[in-house]
Image: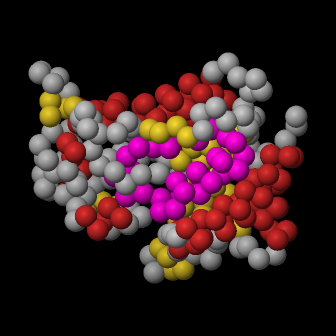
Amino acid sequence: MAGGAEPVLRAADGPPVLLGPADPPPFEVVNAGGRARVLFVCDHASNRIPAALGTLGLDGDRLQEHIAWDIGAAAVADSLSGRFDAPLVKSGYSRLVIDCNRGPSDATSIPAVSDGVPIPGNRALNGAEAAARARQFMAPYHAEIERLLDGARDPPFHAFVSVHSFTPVFGGKPRPWQVSALWNRDGRLALPFMAALAARGDVTVGDNQPYSARNNFGYTVHRHGELRDLPHLLVEIRQDLIAEAGGVRKWAAIVGDALAAAFDSLPP
């Protein structure tokens, strides 16, 4: 593959094989036996690239940046999973391999350029190569979420929360929000969540900022929450606040308190 990526293995007369025996699985489940009625997910938890794709032609330092993952989001999601005793599903590979929060037909699903940075290993993919990424990385992640939601469970899940993070500056403009709620038609979690944050008086809350769930930024919550009529929320936290362990502890507690208020507002 162009751009310094390693050669892609292929099964005989078949599609590309991107996950080798030494590669970790395409998702991780934390606290699978958790008894809370909420399922947490983290779509951009990892910056890992499978060995077959090398570094996608990027310098190693680029894979530590926000273009490769949601900085701090996995650590916050881990903390929330522990606090609520809730299961958590985390993606196992970088959003640059394939974005698990985009539909496979979305133009940004496998970006050739991300935030102005060219991704050489994503240039000129053919249909079979793109389909292989969707099948080997994205599909298992979403299948595991569906398995948990569809499984026999007493009590059943009554909330679905996706944890993300966003950059403090975009296009040269600072983003003032510390925590944001992305939601579309269903405000059962978003509205009490934002109200609880606003009531603190020390948090700048974004309502569908800096992105809007009404503009296709929430594939996962749409697929697993909205289409099931399951109360759902996409939480965004500014990355500079959660890049270090101390910030993760602080903001996981703040977000957790607001989520607790939102969960308490739901019917039993």
Measured as percent of width and height from the top left, residue 153 is found at 70, 23
In the image, residue 157 lies at what x, y percent?
72, 32
Where's residue 17, x and y in %? 22, 31
Q: Is residue 60 magenta?
A: no
- Pick whichever, 227 or 39, lies toward us: 39
In the rendered view, tell whether residue 264 sits above or below residue 137: below
- Residue drawn at point x = 20 percent, y = 27 percent: 15
Residue name at image x 52 percent, y 70 percent:
244
State how the image is colored: secondary structure
Residue 222 visible in the snapshot: no
- Magenta includes 92? yes
- Whether residue 149 is visible to the viewer of this picture, yes or no, is yes
Identify the residue at horizontal 27%, vertical 44% (top origin): 50
Measured as percent of width and height from the top left, residue 106 is found at: 41, 44
Q: Residue most toward the top?
A: 152
Q: Which residues are magenta?
A: 68-96
Report the residue at 52% width, 37% height from top.
29
**Residue 155 horizontal side relative to residue 169, left or right:** right
Residue 221 versus residue 260 in the image, above or below:
above
Q: Decide which of 244, 174 is in the foreground and name it.
A: 244
